Amino acid sequence: MALKPNSTDTRTRSSIQISVVVGLCCFFYILGAWQRSGFGKGDSIALEMTKHSADCSIVPTLNFETHHAGEVGNVDESEKPKSFEPCHPRYVDYTPCQDQSRAMTFPRDNMIYRERHCPREEEKLHCLVPAPNGYVTPFPWPKSRDYVPYANAPYKALTIEKAIQNWIQYEGNVFRFPGGGTQFPQGADKYIDQLAKVIPITNGMVRTALDTGCGVASWGAYLWSRNVIAMSFAPRDSHEAQVQFALERGVPAVIGVLGTIKMPYPSRAFDMAHCSRCLIPWGANDGMYMKEVDRVLRPGGYWVLSGPPINWRNNYRAWQRPKKELEEEQKKIEEVAKLLCWEKKHEKGEIAVWQKRVNDEACSGRQHNSQANFCKAEEANDVWYKKMDACLTPYPDVSNPEEVAGGKLKQFPERLYAVPPRVASGSVPGVSVETYQGDNEKWKKHVGAYKKINRLIDSGRYRNILDMNAGLGGFAAALDSPKLWVMNVMPTIAEKDTLGVIFERGLIGIYHDWCEAFSTYPRTYDLIHAHGLFSLYKDKCNLEDILLEMDRILRPEGAVIFRDEVDVLIKVKKITAGMRWDTKMVDHEDGPLVPEKILVAVKRYWVVGANSTSVQ
């Protein structure tokens, strides 16, 4: 299978210049025609598409001064914006908080060196991370599940290292992903079929999943067709570019590791957790990692462990490991599972499945067990850079033995708009049922307006979407589509912690502080949404740093939607003028008198060595 060749002499990318002439609506129409091709753009296409400009509604230039007073008058629009140069080509896959050279200076115990270690202020790069030469728009889903252009992640090590395990194959100028894995060489679909005999994967009760040590995330990729969304993670380059491949395929994934710090997810978040030969020492450190999985696993949720040491008696020879070592490893796992009050539902071949009890009433005597050291209930969601403890996360209280601790969830997709238990119970201060329902209506209206501005939304062009300040998840819910997924980020400085509500809706998300880099590779997201983000962070850190990080993780020709106060957006617009972005300000959908505006941006296409000098 071969990709169409790129025409490098037409890579001047005149798309953004055209937007000035034909207006925002036409700009996205033209951009859509180019981007849908998957292979870059050319001036001949631009010329042809420009002929349609007469059919578009031109968005007029806005006069902000007449609509809103304040800092607008203090901004000198004539001042030349600061220009950001490209970073050196060696930074093409730069991940600031998982930089390999920095990582090697930290201890290797408990994977500390693979955890987040972000650069100090004086070490930060103030340049634009380039795309590799030959970079092309990824294939649309579901084709992207199986094929990734070689130029986007040109690393062949896994095709050799994992050749017999069917992870990835190199064919011409694309990688092909047959759907195999170390533990499922016959394919992820058949493996999931095995799990579905024990776990109710197909009825909507299992919606959110966590894949620890995900490889290239084939398990998550094939769960998607069953309406299950998996949060996959793996360390930075344990195997070369594994998380990068997952994201290029259009599968949710982040760089992460079970080390000494709590996972950046709230308690009771996932319906299912999974480890397939993920090499995590589950029984070590008093079962600390199993206890951390228990924290994020919903009452009644499932934990799947496949591979060593399961069924060690029949497999130790194939694994080339001592029987005694494997026996002791499984014994420790069983002991921790018993302490956690997980019920073993299945063990066959190399697959074992446990189910977490629905409440503490089912765990008779655990409170009096001398080994049962309980965490403080109020610290269950306090995770950002917090040390992992070998303690048990307590269940929420229940009134009877049959009640699901924390509240029973609806099946998906009904779960998406049903009132989440944390809202119904008043667990989130300041968020009532009425607040939640009003927020949903507001975001349906906002997303409707976005789709009029940018016709590519829900066209299949945008697969990986990031909401940088997700609130109650209304943006992601209004966008819900089999063509896309949204990473909902809960800023650690947000006034309300609503990430647990987002998971109860059947969506996924993560805690993060935007004063630091995100745990992902460059060119991860197709569309970024930032609602009120810069108002939130304006006194916390440098807005320039946040925008440069957005540029790092945004694909060439990807789009950004900012929604914020006009004063803030003018400052943002001024910075982006030096970032090879093209922007357009649009009024709030309720009219020009509303001080909140929308700033739409598109990142131009450019690659290593393209009409630029590099910052060393």
Image: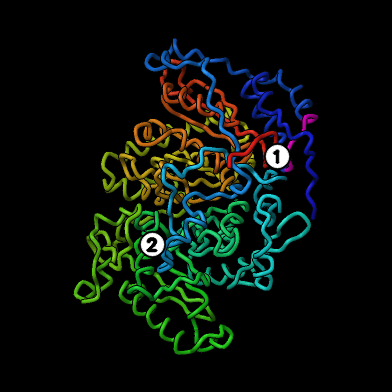
Q: Give the quarter of the figure containing the N terminus.
A: bottom right
Give the SS element for disc 1: helix
Q: Residues within 10 Å of mark 1 (few under 14, many from 20)?
A: some
Q: Nearer the viewer, residue 513 or 36?
A: 513
Task: Read off the residue under disc 1.
Answer: 36
Q: Nearer the viewer, residue 205 or 390?
A: 390
Looking at the rendering, the stretch of residues picked out in magenta corresponds to 39-45
Looking at numbered disc 1 in the image, what kind of residue is underneath it?
Arg
Q: Give the quarter of the figure containing the C terminus.
A: top right
The label shown at residue 297 is: 2
Residue at figure coordinates x 78%, y 49% from the top left: 3
Res 173 quadrant in image:
bottom right
Q: Position of residue 410 (x, y in %)?
A: 41, 53
Q: Residues within 10 Å of mark 2 (few under 14, many from 20)?
A: many
The single residue placed furthest to the front in the displayed view is 616
Q: Position of residue 136 (x, y in %)?
A: 70, 44
Above-or-below relation of 593 to 374: above
Give the SS element for disc 2: strand
